[in-house]
Image (cartoon, helix red, strand yellow):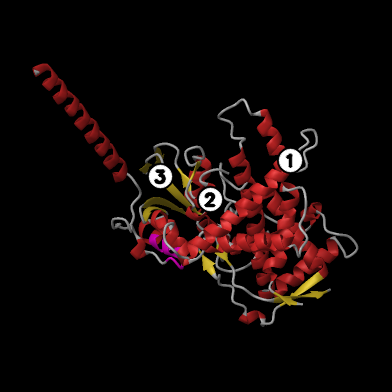
Amino acid sequence: MLASGLLLVALLSCLTIMVLMSVWRQRKFWGKLPPGPGALPFIGNYLQLNTEQMYNSLMKISECYGPVFTVHLGTRRIVVLCGHEAVKEALVDQAEEFSGRGKQATFDWLFKGYGAFIDPTFFLSRTVSNVISSIVFGDRFDYEDKEFLSLLRMMLGSFQFTATPTGQLYEMFSSVMKHLPGPQQQAFKELQGLEDFIAKKVEQNQRTLDPNSPRDFIDSFLIRMQEEQKHPNSEFHMKNLVMTTLNLFFAGTETVSTTLRYGFLLLMKHPDVEAKVHEEIDRVIGKNRQPKFEDRAKMPYTEAVIHEIQRFGDMIPMGVARRVTKDTKFWNFLLPKGTEVFPMLGSVLRDPKFFSNPGDFNPQHFLDEKGQFKKNDAFVPFSIGKRSCFGEGLARMELFLLLTNIMQNFRFKSPQSPKDIDMSPKHVGFATIPRNYTMSFMPR
């Protein structure tokens, strides 16, 4: 009895020591996290944040705590990085440590960690989406196809939800809000509709697959799945195929089309810039042939305008969340493994050290004294480091070819005078969404 009693005491003592060491270790790490505003249980820093202007709220906090600080979005503890120096040091200089996938609650609900006067919204999204559709599905949609239009509405709806105040609340309290009624349920319905469409496309490809003649991305993935059947830990499985295809289709449609939509509005606001682009197109390409991507090298002003549209439009202002893959020393802080990180891309795109007038739309930000295009290290709309956008090359090509093709044939006209055009965004959250507007395309 004595021996067993002593053994029990010894086990309890060991467990107590292990618990105390764990608590001490956590306190030690907590003590080395970047500073930030005090947080309340469960709601975190909600009372100090404006969900209608989340990016601006976080930038205001950085004025008090510096370019690296900690904030609590509900129960989520986030380390926020502001400015070129901090973002570059994390995502490039310590790329491996900051390469973990962070959380985006709305999309994570579905992806779960797997891969005349018109409103130009659907005009542009149909055009852009058919580019990525030809790659992913090996075919294009008819512009009036009802299923296609339904898909575009679902993508636009769920994408815009992430930028709304409710979308930002969901980022903080997703564990509760996913069970409650509200706009988030409509976003889930739209995302589920997109998944169902992709699953149907994959099924069609499976039935007609010829391993010797792949037609598109889905075929190529299915062939690789067959080759990897004997590897139980392979990433090439059905769930990843559906989610990767949806990711490509979604991101390849919404980001480029929204950038162009903002671009048209900016060009109507600045007709002098539009006129210079028209002049360069006429001089380099003319009117008797279509633009080619190779023309870009001879068109520094157009290239500068496209870069400035992306910089000013600031499509994903808070960046895609990262997560540190191990206990990481960063500056004078220690970030525990698993800590989420927001690389504030908007703060880099507006860093006054790199852009003389960051609040103004000005293509001169990307032109030298001789009018030649100049690169800028703070141009990071596709992010940087290990999780930068792998569709960057395609997006750059699409933006150049679509804009130059349209502007070769049309000039833009707004029902408002340029001075009355409102450039402020409709929503800023995970994404920046421009205001709805109408315009006319006037033949040149």
Residue at mark 1 = 207
Vertical side of 233 occupied by 1: above or below:
above
Task: State yes or no: residue 52 in magenta.
Answer: yes
Instruction: Say whether disc 1 or disc 2 marks the residue closer to the N-terminus.
Output: 2
Of marks 1 and 3, which one's residue comes earlier in the chain? Answer: 1
Mark identifier at residue 110: 2
Q: List the single residue furthest toward the right.
A: 288
In the image, residue 382 above or below residue 4: below
Q: Secondary structure at mark 1?
A: helix
**Residue 63: x %, y % from top left:** 39, 61
251 part of magenta stretch: no
Q: Give the residue displayed 70% in from the left and 42% down from the top.
A: 218
441 left or right, relative to 388: right
Q: Nearer the viewer, mark 3 or mark 2?
A: 2
Residue 439 screen position, x and y as percent = 71, 76
The answer to which image quadrant residue 173 occupies is bottom left
**Dominant secondary structure, magenta:** helix
Q: Is residue 330 left or right of residue 288?
A: left
Q: For label 1, count other residues whose C-alpha is less than 10 Å away and answer few (under 14), some (14-19) or many (20+).
A: few
Disc 1 residue type (three-letter): Arg
Q: Which amino acid, by three-letter code, is at mark 2? A: Leu
Label 3 residue SS: loop
| Along the line of sight, the residue nearer the viewer: 156 or 190 | 190
Q: Locate the N terminus by quadrant.
A: top left
Badge 3: residue crowd in 10 Å (few <14, some 14–19, many ≥20): many
**Residue behind mark 3:** 339
Q: Which region shows up in magenta?
A: 51-61
**Residue 172: quarter of image:** bottom left
